[in-house]
């Protein structure tokens, strides 16, 4: 969750993020002289979901928030109203009035750059409460039904599934460079070539498809002669979940993929790499939290994460069932 930089300064990849697909809702909350961008919600989410997202960014409790201009038929929209029925234009600015509780401020204040990596937390204690919650499973079911997957290549019989995050996993999206190649994580193509032998490959990033597409083209991942990408997912396939300790967070629920491709993929044959552990909240067993690739110019010579992960993938691909694995120990 968080405000994302709109400009990626380095010239080779200077693309602006644009509006999400139709079913996403993106709004900008103005509060306390600042603007907070919220892009993780869908038309099926409610005003309460929006308020929860605002809470996690501002620390203002939902019951203390007054959202100006959010109206249905001239009346303030109630918490149960679905965002889709408000017919908001992308990035509609909404003024919020409300004050933070004393004490909440320190816990919930956004970190300096609102950086997801800084914002990450260890999911263990949150997991049990969240994974099987009815409302979360219902959200996944809605994504299975409504999210449109554009297949680039057909799934292959008998293959495992590898789901990959993009930012900080496959390349360093914050450093400046002349070309995307300079920011690419070392061994990326070797890694994907090797993984493709046993795994169908899916890319999943918490941004918009336009942006993901641009990045993957720049890196030479699309149309690579040595491997194929099965499909790509963007932020609209994600869901927000309420966690007891950290409020509302965005996660990447593999249930969306499993629901859409029941005959191919399941928790038994799927592994997901991400530098943000909380993305695994709905399926902790299937997540492998990798080290983020940052400061490309400094670390390009040293980083061997993908090289080592390719070996791990080869190793576990021999197994019929991944459910007994603990990916936390992947390096042992
Ligand atoms: Mg990432």
Image (spheres, rainbow, N blue to C red):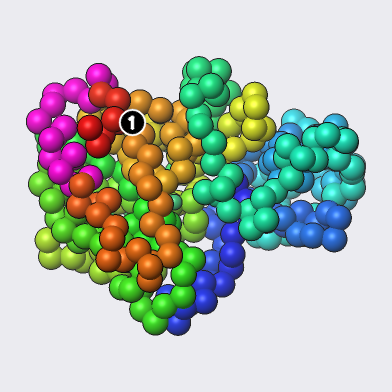
- The residue sitting at 13% across, 26% down in the picture is 319
> 102 above or below 54?
above
- Residue 152 lies, in percent from the top left, at 26, 56
- Residue 245 lies, in percent from the top left, at 65, 27
- Name the residue carrying label 1: 328
Is residue 156 inside the magenta stretch?
no
Q: Does 161 sit left or right of 130 as displayed?
A: left
Give the image quarter of residue 49: top right
Q: Does 20 sit left or right of 222 as displayed?
A: right
Viewport quadrant of the C terminus = top left
Residue closest to the eye, 21 or 116:
116
Is residue 318 inside the magenta stretch?
yes
Residue closest to the eye, 330 or 142:
330
* Residue 57 showing in the rendered view: yes
Residue closest to the eye, 316 or 72:
316
- The residue sitting at 76% across, 59% down in the picture is 35
Give the image quarter of residue 274: top left
> 255 above or below 27?
above
Q: Does 233 sit left or right of 94 as displayed?
A: left
- The residue sitting at 46% across, 43% down in the picture is 276
Callout 1: CB less than 8 Å from ligand 1: no
- The residue sitting at 35% across, 63% down in the picture is 299
Magenta part of the chain: 309-324
- Residue 223 lies, in percent from the top left, at 21, 66
């Amino acid at each position: 969750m968080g405000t994302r930089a709109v400009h990626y300064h380095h010239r080779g990849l200077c693309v602006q993020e644009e509006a999400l697909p139709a079913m996403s809702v993106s709004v900008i909350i103005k509060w306390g002289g600042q603007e907070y961008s919220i892009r993780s919600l869908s038309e099926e989410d409610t005003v309460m979901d929006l308020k929860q997202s605002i809470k996690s960014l501002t620390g203002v409790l939902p019951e203390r928030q007054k959202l100006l201009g959010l109206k249905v038929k001239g009346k303030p929209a109630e918490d149960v109203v679905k965002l889709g029925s408000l017919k908001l234009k992308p990035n509609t600015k909404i003024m919020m009035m409300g004050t933070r509780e004393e004490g909440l401020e320190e816990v919930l204040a956004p970190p300096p750059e609102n950086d997801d990596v800084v914002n990450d937390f260890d999911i263990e204690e949150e997991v049990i409460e969240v994974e099987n919650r009815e409302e979360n499973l219902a959200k996944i079911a809605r994504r299975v039904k409504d999210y449109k997957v554009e297949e680039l290549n057909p799934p292959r019989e008998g293959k495992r599934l590898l789901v990959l995050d993009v930012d900080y996993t496959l390349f360093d999206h914050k450093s400046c460079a002349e070309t995307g190649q300079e920011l690419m994580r070392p061994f990326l193509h070797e890694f994907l070539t090797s993984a493709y032998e046993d795994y169908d490959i899916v890319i999943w990033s918490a941004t918009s498809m336009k942006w993901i597409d641009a990045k993957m083209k720049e890196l030479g991942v699309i149309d690579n002669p040595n491997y194929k990408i099965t499909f790509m997912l963007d932020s609209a396939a994600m869901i927000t979940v309420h966690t007891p300790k950290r409020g509302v967070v965005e996660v990447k629920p593999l249930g969306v993929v499993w629901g859409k491709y029941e005959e191919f993929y399941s928790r038994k044959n799927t592994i997901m790499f991400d530098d943000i552990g909380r993305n695994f909240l709905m399926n902790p067993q299937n997540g492998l939290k990798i080290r983020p690739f940052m400061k490309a110019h400094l670390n390009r010579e040293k980083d061997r994460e993908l090289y080592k992960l390719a070996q791990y993938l080869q190793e576990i691909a021999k197994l019929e069932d991944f459910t007994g694995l603990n990916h936390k120990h992947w390096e042992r």
